[in-house]
Amino acid sequence: MLNRSAVSLLIIGFIFSVSCGKSKPDSPQDAPTGNRKSPIAIASIEHENTYMKVVYGQPYRKGRTIFGEWEPYGQVWRTGANEATEITITEPVLMNMEVIDAGTYSLFTIPNKESWTIILNNGLGQWGAFDYNEQLDAYRFTVPVQNLDSPVEAFTISFSDLKGSTTVMSLSWDLVKVDIPIRFY
């Protein structure tokens, strides 16, 4: 017969093993429903008649090494958590010196140690990157990685303050940051 202390330790051990194990789904069917561990976040900016909005799931680091381990180098990433991140642009803009047409795109990335490939894809409404289709890519370009001195706990997409007609969209998590320069027309 187990005493209360032993039962409590068994319960705590079970909860710890379930909640601390690798819980990243391997397919859309394995994705959790209901309350999600990663909240929805929105980043937006407006310049004259142009509005940009990014809607993404905001995962947390939780002591993990993110890039190169949790998110492997060289593989397409949904650029957040839950559904694929979506970016809406109401008028054409220059993004990393490439003309991007108005529209809504899924924002995928391919993280690597020195640079990331940024992908704007026409496949909307996807869960993660499980059904990512390269043939639906509208735009692809590469930006350099900046290594940070202190870790960013929550994956964050943000826009810098406008300087004239330019801004920078930053993607930051763990010890990594990438900046995407944007110029409005």
Image (spheres, grey):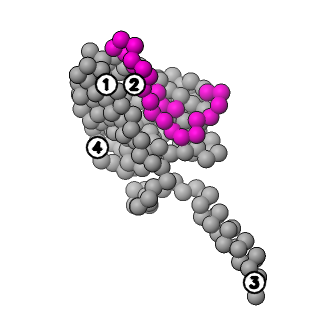
Q: CA distance from mark 3 to mark 4?
A: 53 Å
Amino acid of disc 4: Leu
Query: At 45% from the left edge and 48% from the top edge, which residue is drawn?
Result: 39
In this view, 21 is above or below 140: below
Give the mark, 1 or 3, whose residue is nearer the N terminus.
Answer: 3
Query: At 33% from the left edge and 33% from the top edge, which residue is drawn?
Result: 53
Query: At 62% from the left edge and 58% from the top edge, which residue is drawn?
Result: 20
Query: At 48% from the left edge and 40% from the top edge, which residue is drawn?
Result: 75
Where is residue 169 drawn, in percent x and y? 42, 26
Q: CA distance from mark 1 to mark 3?
A: 63 Å
Residue 153 lies within the magenta run: yes
Viewed as shown, does residue 106 lie left or right of 7?
left
Amino acid of disc 3: Leu
Q: Which residue is mark 1?
A: 46
- Secondary structure at numbered mark 1: strand
Residue 167 lies within the magenta run: yes
Give the mark, 2 or 1, whose residue is nearer the N terminus.
Answer: 1
What's drawn in magenta, residue-wise? 148-172
- Secondary structure at numbered mark 2: strand
Q: Which residue is mark 2?
A: 141
Res 2 label: 3
Residues at marks 2 and 1 touching, judged by CB atoms closer than 8 Å: no
Are there few (<14), some (14-19), or many (20+) residues within 10 Å of tag 1? few
Principal secondary structure, stretch drawn in magenta: strand
Where is residue 11 drawn, in percent x and y? 66, 72
